Image: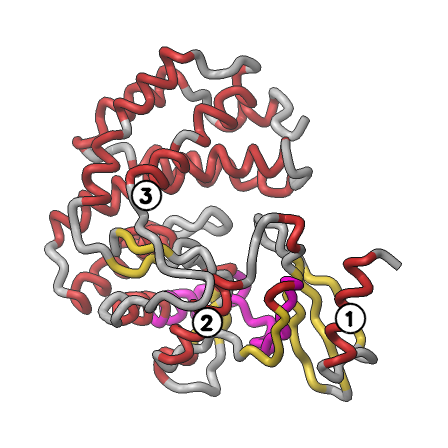
Amino acid sequence: MTSRAAAIDAFLAAEGWGAAARRPLAGDASARRYARLERNGAPAILMDVPPASGLTVAPFLAVTAWLRGLGLSAPAILAADPPEGLVLLEDLGEDVFLRLAADPAREAGLYAAAIDLVADLQSAPPPAPAAHWSPLPYDRAVLMREMRLAPEWYLPAATGAPASPDLAAEFDALVEPIVAIALDGPQLPVYRDYHAENLIWLPRRAGHARVGLLDYQDLLIGHPAYDVVSLLEDARRDTSPELRAAMQARYLARTGAEPGAFARAAHALAAQRNLKILGLFVRLARRDGKPGYLRHLPRVWAHLQRDLAHPDLAPLAAFVARRLPPPEAALAAGAAS
């Protein structure tokens, strides 16, 4: 038995779950691993964050406490061993929005609940610093580091050649307007991965608690438009223009945000996010052995083309048209190799 398996066994035994049946669950884009447990008909989720990965459960525990303190349905913490990176969680079930929203009769209602929640969440006081964690700003360094994933990973996969220093410098100059827009506005809690795969429908609960929340440990303090575009420009499922327009209008009505300023910010933050995702998904395939993410590249590319239609981003749009081939080229070039 490996030392990691032994640590997990010891943790579960100490918490009374040693004899529970275990079923591995699909992980996220990080080194975190999950298993569904069942003990005498009672379910739970094991989160396994190996310390060797360089990750820690401290952000997850801190943001969970903040969300639950607001009455929201982050999973209850049943037990935790932070030094070992092990957490036993409430199982919120399997009714993910990603699956349920495939029913046209349910899609708008689910998205309305998600929009209402994130709009009100943004009006809450941000989380206070906790043990071994404090909320950090979504600042220029983070925004640039994420966008640079496109020339660093996506472009070489599509062209077979790394980005030249001149091309990298040109890219940096052209994305500066995105940074300026992102930092010119209210700076509020940003969930970052607020999309249909991370939301669970809990109809027996009331109000915002009907929306179960997962994968929020990367929270930063940044522009409120980010989570709206994360939800509506989902890398994993298509959303119609009508749904996106209706949900943006719902968000504006609920928050009182100025429509023109919000539309400008939404285009910029969506472009930032989708440039990041193009590079991130290729990196997951090439570096981390997770090629399944590549199937989403055409959808992310389509989102990016829509984002770049805003006049503020016309120079960047021209650069993308000249320098970044569409994802078919990346896939044909063997992005997973």
Residue identified by numbered label 1: 22
Q: Secondary structure at mark 1?
A: strand
The part of the chain drawn in magenta is: 84-113
Crowd tier of the residue under label 1, counting other residues whose Cα lies within 10 Å: few below 14, some 14–19, many 20 or above:
some
Q: Nearest the camera: 195 or 168?
A: 168
Which tag, 2 or 3, sits closer to the chain's start?
2
Q: Residue at x 37, y 14 (%)?
A: 167
Residue 100 locus on image (x, y percent): 51, 67
Residue identified by numbered label 2: 64
Residue 78 locus on image (x, y percent): 60, 80
17 sits to left or right of 279: right
Residue identified by numbered label 3: 270
Q: Secondary structure at mark 3?
A: helix
Which tag, 1 or 2, sits closer to the chain's start?
1
Vertical placement of 153 versus 280: above or below? above
Crowd tier of the residue under label 3, counting other residues whose Cα lies within 10 Å: few below 14, some 14–19, many 20 or above:
many
Q: What distance separates the C-alpha of mark 3 from that of mark 1?
A: 38 Å
Of labels 2 and 3, the one closer to you: 2
What's under tag 3, amino acid-wise? Ala
Q: Residue at x 73, y 73 (%)?
A: 11
Vertical placement of 208 versus 163: above or below? below
